[in-house]
Every structure is written in C-alpha cells, then in structure tokens.
Image (cartoon, coloured by chain):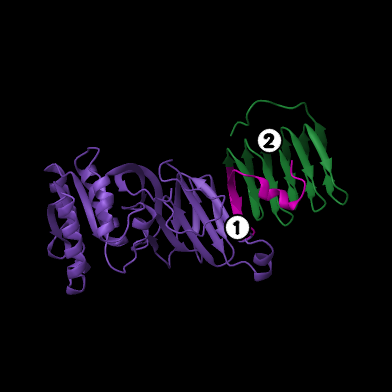
Chain colours: A purple, B green
Amino acid sequence: MHIYIYDDYVNTKKYDNALARIETRITDLGLNGKIIRLGLLKNINEAVENEIKRGAKTIVAVGSDRTVNKIINAIIIAGINNQMKIETPLGIIPVGNESNTIAETLGVGQEEEAGDVLSARRIEKLDIAQAGHSFFISQAQIASQGTTLEIEKDYSIEIMEPGEIDVINLSIFSNLPEKAKPNPKDGILELYIKTKAGRKLTKLNPAANQSLFSLKKLTIINPKYPIILDNSIAVSTPAEISVNRSLNVIVGKERRF
Amino acid sequence: MFKSQDEKEKIKEVETIIGPSIKVKGNFNGQGNIVVEGILEGSLKTNGDVFIGDKAKIAAIIEAREARIGGEITGNIKIKKHMEVVASARIFGDVECASLSVERGAVLNGKCTMLPERKDEIKS
C-alpha cells in the first residue's frame, strides 16, 4: 500500500483545492493509499516504522523540503531500530509555495505532476548524509563566521573572510562552480566554501572566492550558528557530517544529477 | 603543462580548490588535481597535478605528478614529471623533478635535483 504523509501545513483550508486535485490524480493513476496527517500524530517515526513493517509499497512525503527531511529521518531511523536495510522507496509530492528545492532537483513536479512521477516509479538509490543525530539528503549549510572545519583528523580549514559553507550530497542550488560535480550516488560529499572576496578580485575572476574539497567525513564547529540541513532543519554544533547510508527515492526524468 | 594563470581553467577535473581566503593546516592527501590560491601549512600530496597560484603562501612539503608553481613556498618539492616555476614564485626549499622550466624573475633558493620520470604512485 502507498502511504501518503501530509505535513501539518497542508492540512489547512488554503490547500484544500490543491489536495483535492492531487487526490483525484492519484486515484486516476490507481495509486490510492493510506493518508497520515502529521498534525495529529504524536510520533511520526513510529508511524513510518509501523507502516514499513506492514509492508508499505511507498512512503510519500506530501509537503515541502522540511517534510522530505522528516520522512527521510523516520525511514532511516526505522532501519536502524530494526537493524534492516529498508528498500521501501520515498516519493515526494510538493505542495504550495513552501521551499521545495529537493523535489525540483529530483525532477519531481509540483502537486498533480508529482503523481505522474510516482506512477512511472523510476527508483534511484541515493546517498543519505548524517549530521550529528540527524539525516539529510541534499545540503548542510552554515555561515563561515566563527566556523572551524576538521577533516578526518588529517587537516583543518580556517576561513578568513565572511561567507557561506555548504556540505553537498545532492546539490539543490544551481550556482555551484562548473568544476563541482556533486553526485548523490558516489559516497562522497563536496565541501564548497564561498567567501565574500573583494569586488575587484571577483570581477577579474568569478571563481576567485570559491573553494572546493571532496571528502567522506568532516566535523563542523561553530558555537554561535547552527547548521541548516535540507534547507529546513537546524542542528547545533559540534557535529560530525558523514555519508554512510542510502535510500531508494522515486525521481523524475528531469532530475539534475 | 600550465602555460599561464589562465591555464588553470583548462584543468578539467579539479578535485580540490583552496581559495584565497582559506587556510589549510595539516596533512592534505589527494588523488586528483589541486589548485592552491590560499594558505597551506603542513604537507600536500597528490597523485594528480598541482597548480599553485601567484598569491598562495605555502609552508609545506609538496609531492605531485606535475606542477605549476607560483607564490611563496617554504618547504621541499618533489614532482614526478614536469615542474613549471613562474615569475611570481619564491621557493625556499629543495626541489626534485624530472623536467623543469623557470621563468625570468622567479626565486629558487635550494638544491635542485633532476630525476628520471617515476611511474610509481605517491604513497600517501
């Protein structure tokens, strides 16, 4: 059975029409299933775990990047709790104007269009990264100010200008340098640092303020700012970030990796 | 290999870029090509090529396949194939390489040893 998990924000009147259209499309495609509404649940992890144990065919996140992140965490934790490799794929139905960069990157269209992607059931096994006790599929971001990066105890990186740090598994932004080619299937994370170099220097060479490293594990320390995972969830530091798990995900033809 | 600063752009597969606002401390071991424009302290070893920018400041041992050296380097350099030293380079350390070119204006203070081309990989 397909399990549709509606985030709490979609359970408002504003999204009644959108949900009705989605549900009609899902019915037309013969993909009906059980609906779980997050607002009424005490424990999403437990609900997802139970549905997987009952043999769910797909777990579908209906909402935004935040919803996708919650469901990914629930699926991975279910696997850890039961010491099993979970093959149940994750599907996504983006709803509304909330941030939906993960779905976009995976080639999943908005609302009803996402139904067609679910129906095509194109499954890719993608890496899942971990930051502290939380999991994420796309990027971890933090301000460079006051941040120390330690790379597998071999070396440390100090950033001398203000800017932004991205640890990328699946790139949700299109402004990365050409040479950075994050691949969510290679078991490697890309560390991308963009600093605010002088305008003159940036004018002469647009790549002048960019740094790039490929790695498997790093520790981020910043006593002031948290790390933002999947464009939505904040995690405090120090946090070790690594990539050591994977998840089946239903993707669209237009995916950007 | 690297004829000018613009040649850096021709390195198609860059594994690592250490930008001008970045300071790396420790032992950096890579497999691919590395561009250094910032500060590096410790050691830098790769099986690929190294491009050291004109404003880089390095206090480290460097080992690579080929290299374009600019900037200020304090430490010994071992290059398996060709090493190109450009005018901006200030090298304070011994150099070992199979082939060498030095541009007018470069400073090289150290022992220079020419080696036959090695085929073995750098042990990291």
Mark number displayed over residue B108:
none
* Disc 1/disc 2 C-alpha distance (Å): 24 Å
- Direction bottom: furthest residue: A14
- Asked whether residue B60 is in view, the answer is no
- Per the image, the residue denoted by label 2 is B65
Q: Is residue B116 left or right of residue A46?
A: right
Front in this rendered view, residue B83 or A121 = A121
Where in the figure is residue B81, as x and y percent of width and height? 73, 33
Mark number displayed over residue B22:
1
Answer whether residue A33 is magenta in the image.
no
- Three-letter amino acid code at the position of disc 2: Arg
Tell which subunit mark 2 falls on: B
Q: Quadrant of residue A207?
A: bottom right
Q: How crowded is mark 2: few (under 14 residues within 10 Å), some or many (20 or more)?
A: many
Query: Magenta stretch?
Result: B1-28
Residue A117, relative to residue B47: is it above or below? below
Q: In which quarter of the image is residue B33?
A: top right
